Amino acid sequence: MTNNWKSIWLKKGQNVLEKDDSLTLRELLKADGFDSVGAGDLTEESWKAFVDFIIQKMEIDSSTQLLEVGCGAGAFLFPIYQKGAKVFGIDYSDTLVNIAKHAMPLGEFKVAEANLIPFDNDQFDVVLSFGVFIYFPTLEYAENVIAEISRVLVKGGKAAILDVNDAKKKQLFFDIRTAEIGEEKYREKYDAYPHMFYEKQWFLDICKKLGLKATIEDQRIENYGNAKFRFNVYIEN
């Protein structure tokens, strides 16, 4: 599968840093693409509610060493950062990384590929990745990313791979997307930009292979159109 998405994400948010004011969560959500097809009527309140759910589920507090793989402009990390946590992030878009640095100056952000995480072994208590695996070029690449996540996690650490396209709901994905803009327009716009879809069992098998424990839950974010065909993977190292 050819991955043309990188060119899209390198262009995202180019005008965001032209303003001198502090960045808002709404601006970060927009830079991260949550104003496009599939996002639905996603509100800041529903976004914050989901982030709070993850904070509780992953037991994140101000002492947690937390990394997001594919952090983009930092919309997911921003509410956590505002609670006083030290956050780290990587993304292959230097534009989005610069936005994250501006929004969260006490965080640490690096430009990097997800399968080559530029941090030490056993460094993080929690690793998160939201809506990123859908843009990977191959299953082999995705497996390498999971191995890298395991490498940088402390023993007993936790990871969450969130917002993953469910292979069993691929037709539903197509039906919802084409209903919004029409099949012809959708194909014209997105045929060169395919999404990866995953079998839930694939994650369970890869995690078992790597000596990790994994559980899977369907995605639930209020007013988020993509939630209908996505799931979340929770991992313990």
Image: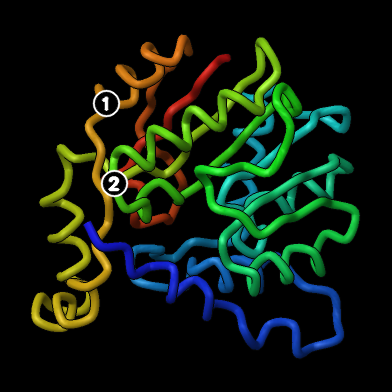
Q: Amino acid at mark 2?
A: Thr
10 Å crowding of disc 2: few (<14), some (14-19), many (20+): some
Q: Which residue is mark 1?
A: 202
Q: Amino acid at mark 1?
A: Trp
To which quarter of the image does residue 193 belong? bottom left
Pick the residue in front: 99 or 137: 137
Q: What is the x, y in percent for residue 45? A: 62, 55
Q: CA distance from mark 1 to mark 2?
A: 13 Å
Residue beneath the point at 15% across and 37% down: 168
Question: For the point 32% across and 63% down, which residue is it?
Answer: 3
Is residue 120 depicted above or below 224 in this figure? Answer: above
Residue beneath the point at 41% across and 44% down: 163
Q: Is residue 45 visible?
A: no
Q: Which mark is residue 23?
A: none
The image shows residue 81, relative to residue 44, as above or below, that is above
> Picture coordinates of residue 164 (x, y %)?
36, 42
Q: Quadrant of the N terminus?
A: bottom left
Instruction: Return the residue nearer the eye: 47 or 146.
Output: 146
- For the residue pair 152 and 29, the one nearer the viewer reads as 152
Q: Is residue 213 left or right of residue 71?
A: left
Q: Nearer the viewer, mark 1 or mark 2?
A: 2
Question: Based on the displayed image, in which of its 4 quarters is residue 135 positioned?
Answer: bottom left
Asked if 74 appears above or below 48 in the picture, the reply is: below
Which numbered tag is attached to residue 138?
Answer: 2
Locate residue 213, reporting x and y percent.
46, 11
